[in-house]
Amino acid sequence: MLPVFYPILDVEAARQREISPLKAAREILEAGAGILQFRCKGFFDRERLVELEKIAELCRQTHTLLVVNDRADLAVLTGAALHLGQTDLPPGDARRITGAEMKIGYSTHNEQQLRAAASQPVDYVALGPIFGTTTKDNPDPVVGVDELRRLRSLTDRPLVAIGGITRANARSVIQAGADSVAVIGDLFPSDGSSLRARVKEWLNLLA
């Protein structure tokens, strides 16, 4: 089972808030998060790899599950789990790289994709965007809480809800059947308070 609070450390979101991904990861882990996804949609150069390796070491020290977005090779290199999207390497092919033991998550955006995921060798599925989101350039149509509630029965895997989830609406998402809520934008405070404090706020909310 996944932790209820699933923070996603998006490199671009961190840059916009003038905090390094390594510093952000340290604060998230110090606050007690049980899982952390590293998401880099831009060019992944050697400097970024070194940064990811340092974050992976922090996760090992705190016994936190690290998840690498999109890249099976980097997940293997850093001993992380892997999260795949609809346009990434198919999960079956990714398994040829990762082996059978690695935990793999898989993004879905509608009923058809969620049904198709049932035949994929993945450990959990994500569904979204539940609400409108600003962290994707071309977001898929909004799913909504009512549709989440209807679709929940279509999978027996742990389900992570994602997209526009904030402290104000997170409880409604859990009540609709999500096992976890993935948070990107509302992970970063806009009032100058610390990321560590925000994560603790999330953990208390979902406890």
Image (cartoon, grey):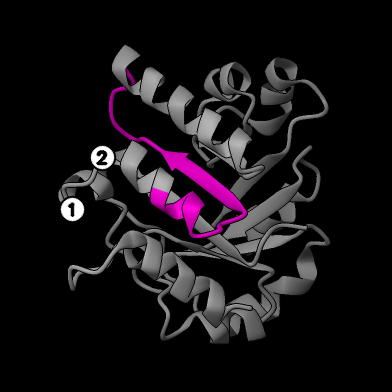
Q: Is 38 part of what is drawn in magenta?
A: yes
User: As drawn, is 106 to the left or to the right of 68?
Assistant: right
In terms of secondary structure, where does tag 1 sit?
Answer: loop
User: As drawn, is 200 to the left or to the right of 150?
Assistant: left
Q: Is 94 part of what is drawn in magenta?
A: no
Between 191 and 120, the one lying in front of the other is 191
Report which residue position mark 1 lands on: 17
**Number of the label disc, if any, that sits on residue 20:** 2
User: As drawn, is 102 to the left or to the right of 166?
Assistant: right
Dot 2 alpha-carbon crowd within 10 angstroms: few under 14, some 14 to 19, many 20 or more: some
Q: Which residues are magenta?
A: 27-45
Name the quarter where the N terminus is drawn: bottom right
Which quadrant of the view contains residue 114? bottom right
- The answer to whether one can see residue 138 in this image is yes
Circle 1: residue type: Arg
Which quadrant of the view contains residue 145? bottom right
Q: Can you name the residue that lies furthest to the top here?
A: 46
* Residue at x-position 69% and y-position 78%: 177
* Residue at x-position 33% and y-position 60%: 195
User: As drawn, is 29 to the left or to the right of 34?
Assistant: left
Circle 2: residue type: Ser
In the figure, 74 relative to 174: above or below? above
Distance, label 1 to label 2, CA atoms, is 9 Å
Q: How far from the left and from the top, in percent, is residue 11?
A: 31, 40
Q: How far from the left and from the top, in percent, is residue 41?
A: 34, 35
Q: How far from the left and from the top, in percent, is residue 169?
A: 45, 84
* Residue at x-position 18% and y-position 73%: 191
Name the quarter where the C terminus is drawn: bottom right
In terms of secondary structure, where does tag 2 sit?
Answer: loop
